[in-house]
Image (cartoon, rainbow, N blue to C red):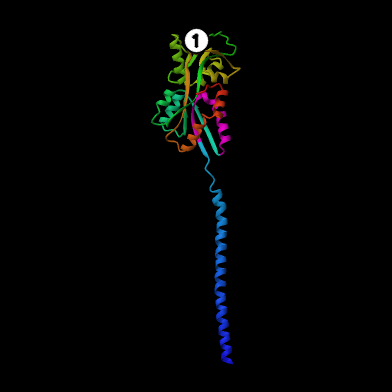
Amino acid sequence: MALSTKRRRAATAVVSAALLIPLAAACSSSSSSGKDSGSDKTASPSGSSGSAPKAAQLTVLAASSLTDVFKAAGAAYEKEHPGTHVKFSFAGSQELAAQVKQGAPADALVTADTKTMDGLKADVNDSSIIAKNRLVIATGKGNPKKVEGLKNLSDTNLKVVLAAPEVPVGRYSKQVLDAQKITVKPVSQEPNVRAVLSKVELGEADAGIVYKTDAASAKGKVDTVDIPDAQNAVAKYPAATLKTSKNADAAAAFVKWLSTPEAQKILQDAGFQQP
């Protein structure tokens, strides 16, 4: 009887132990699964959101004649591309070229002529024409000197200001004057088109040759005398990314955007012609 009882107790202990082993394993598995699940939940939000993308800070070197229109274009681009900020540095194309050759930190370049851009082939990637422009004669408000055309600019009693010949607008001006065999002795030669416009606007010059778009930007402050197409020159504006850009993809996207319908509308509303 005692032996039988001992055997029953032993059997019961064995059965209990056998039942406890899978239960412990299940608990262990459940605990482990819970940890994994918790880990997944923690990783999932992090994985889905990822690290916030670094905002692209672009520096674009642009010809002075693009000052007003590019401010509008830059605002439109930033609105369309949240997180990207476009900073412009405006100057005469020849000055911009010097900055590029000196290694100025920038991402893209837009000049007012192809000659300047072609001289930077070692520093820029392939360029594309984004706009065109034409020349006009800017005079004082009301055109007090009664300037009618290019031939009047040879009058020695007229104070004429031109851009320096190494500046695109200065080179275009020389081109149209030479073609008409007109000799002009300017009272000054300025480093960019905006400086020419400013001289006329302030009354320091009676007339000056500028781009059509620049004269339009000073509407109400200067008058404009058109130059016939047959006597005019067409300015082409190429845009390219710099090979030293630290934001190559973002810079390329901006340059490409300049040829989109949205950007072209902004340029043409400002008086620029289609590429």
Q: Quadrant of residue 221?
A: top right
Q: At which x and y percent is residue 142?
A: 60, 11
Residue at position x 57%, y 59% from top? 37
> Which SS does the magenta portion mostly show?
helix
Quadrant for the N terminus in the image: bottom right
Q: Which residues are magenta?
A: 58-82
Q: Is residue 176 above or below residue 125?
A: above
In front: 125, or 72? 125
In front: 136, or 170? 136
Local crowd size for mark 1, using a 10 Å CA cut-off: few (<14), some (14–19), many (≥20): many
Q: Quadrant of residue 6?
A: bottom right
Q: At which x and y percent is residue 207?
A: 52, 13
Residue at the right extreme of this rendering: 220
Q: Is residue 215 above or below residue 46?
A: above
Residue at position x 55%, y 57% from top? 40
Residue at position x 47%, y 32% from top? 108
Three-letter residue code for mark 1: Leu
Q: SS class of the residue under badge 1?
A: helix
Q: Quadrant of residue 146?
A: top right
Q: Is residue 240 above or below residue 11?
A: above
Residue at the left extreme of this rendering: 122
Q: At which x and y percent is residue 231?
A: 48, 12
- Residue identified by numbered label 1: 150
Q: Is residue 76 magenta?
A: yes
In front: 32, or 133? 32
Q: At which x and y percent is residue 269?
A: 58, 23
Please state the total of marks drawn on the protein image.
1
Residue at the bottom extreme of this rendering: 1
